[in-house]
Image (cartoon, rainbow, N blue to C red):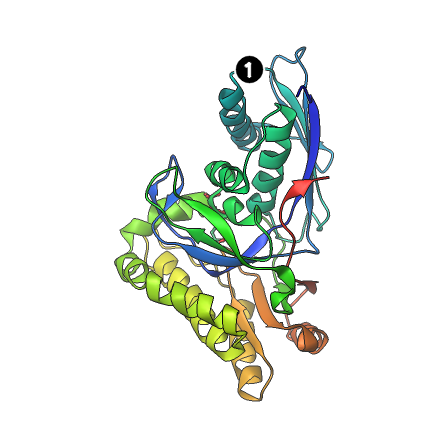
Amino acid sequence: MNIQSATAIAHPNIAFIKYWGNTSDALRLPRNGSISMNLQELTTQTTVTLDPSLPKDIFDLNGVRQTGDALRRVTDHLNLIRGIRGISTRAHIHSQNDFPANSGIASSAAAFGALTVAGVRAVGIEMSEKDLSRLARRGSGSACRSIPQGYVEWLRGSTDKDSYAISIAAPDHWPLADCIALVDTTNKKVTSTEGHRASSSSPVQEGRVLDAPRRLERCRDAIMARDFNALAEVMEQDSNLLHAVTMTSNPAVYYWQTVTFDIMQAVIAWRQTGVPAAFTIDAGPNVHVICESSVSSLVREKLLAIPGVQDVMIAHPGEKAKLA
Ligand code: DP6
């Protein structure tokens, strides 16, 4: 096989049980396993074209030429892939997100999922889903979960070989929706990578990690049984634990804004009146409100009525990363 150019698409994912902290930052080996859902309506499409005439990689994101850290991270990841094949040919990388650039959804998961699938094919290697997931993990931890389809578990493992993600249920297993309430669309101030590094300075982190197997089991069982209340309980607790760690790390990081907390309280109140909705929050102020698909329009309307909510995007369980 001598393919020089390949295009792949991948979706971001939202974690119900979150990844926060590594045993190896270099290999992105996580302290705990995690569980997520791919987001079908949000897509990153990436083309990798090998070009022997290039002195270094060129990376265009949404039509804008990238330099500095963004380019370095992509080159580092392609170097891993080129290394497997024993080549050093530089590449032109075109990446396009179909979600708004200013949405505050800067998904490294979709980015490194698509880059991995396209890069591996461009250099002419065949790889199993497991090995693609292991490789995507090296680019961004959460990217390993964007390789398989639907509902996904990242098996923590303890080495590069046994830390990867598998699908635990197909997208149509449970029609949930993620109503993403956008409250701030500027770039986040403290990146996840920095957050992972700081996590061990929080005394809360050890408790969060020790209890992770219980939360993973509760979440897995809730997904299998399509038990929304059980999912809501463990998902909100897990999100709060992550933020308890960031707020007690050194230096402390506060990702929430006032409106973030307003939404959390509103969602809890809606659930008490019978609306199947629950919140989870990543390393930023936007709130992912996970709900049964049947109530997603209602949840969107309710969210838009909260002062400070700028927009709401809705996404459903997504497909795996694949060649376009
Ligand atoms: C809060 O995968 O973005 O979204 O490996 O440094 O790229 P890097 O970190 P990243 O961390 C994701 C953190 C999170 C929780 C999660 O998605 O599990």
Q: Is residue 305 visible?
A: no
Q: Is residue 124 above or below residue 206?
A: above
Residue at image point 55% right, 15% down: 88
**Residue 20, percent from left and from top:** 40, 52
The answer to which image quadrant residue 311 occupies is bottom right
- Pick the front one: 263 or 96: 96
**Residue 19, percent from left and from top:** 42, 53
| 92 lies left or right of 284 | right
Q: Quadrant of the C terminus?
A: top right
**Residue 5, percent from left and from top:** 70, 25
Q: Is residue 129 above or below residue 82?
A: below
Residue at image point 56% right, 77% down: 267
Q: Is mark 1 within 8 Å of ligand 1?
A: no
Label 1 crowd bin: few (<14), some (14–19), many (20+), radius 10 Å? some
Q: Find numbered disc 1 in the image and state the secondary structure of the residue it sits on.
A: loop
| 211 lies left or right of 311 | left
| 106 lies left or right of 252 | right
Q: Which residue is mark 1?
A: 88
In the image, what residue type sits under mark 1?
Ser
**Residue 289, percent from left and from top:** 58, 69
The answer to which image quadrant residue 56 occupies is top right
Residue furthest toward the bottom?
A: 273
- Pick the front one: 162 or 139: 162
Q: Is residue 295 above or below residue 131?
A: below
Q: Is residue 259 visible?
A: yes
Residue at image point 66% right, 21% down: 1
Residue at image point 62% right, 49% down: 320
The answer to which image quadrant residue 193 occupies is top left
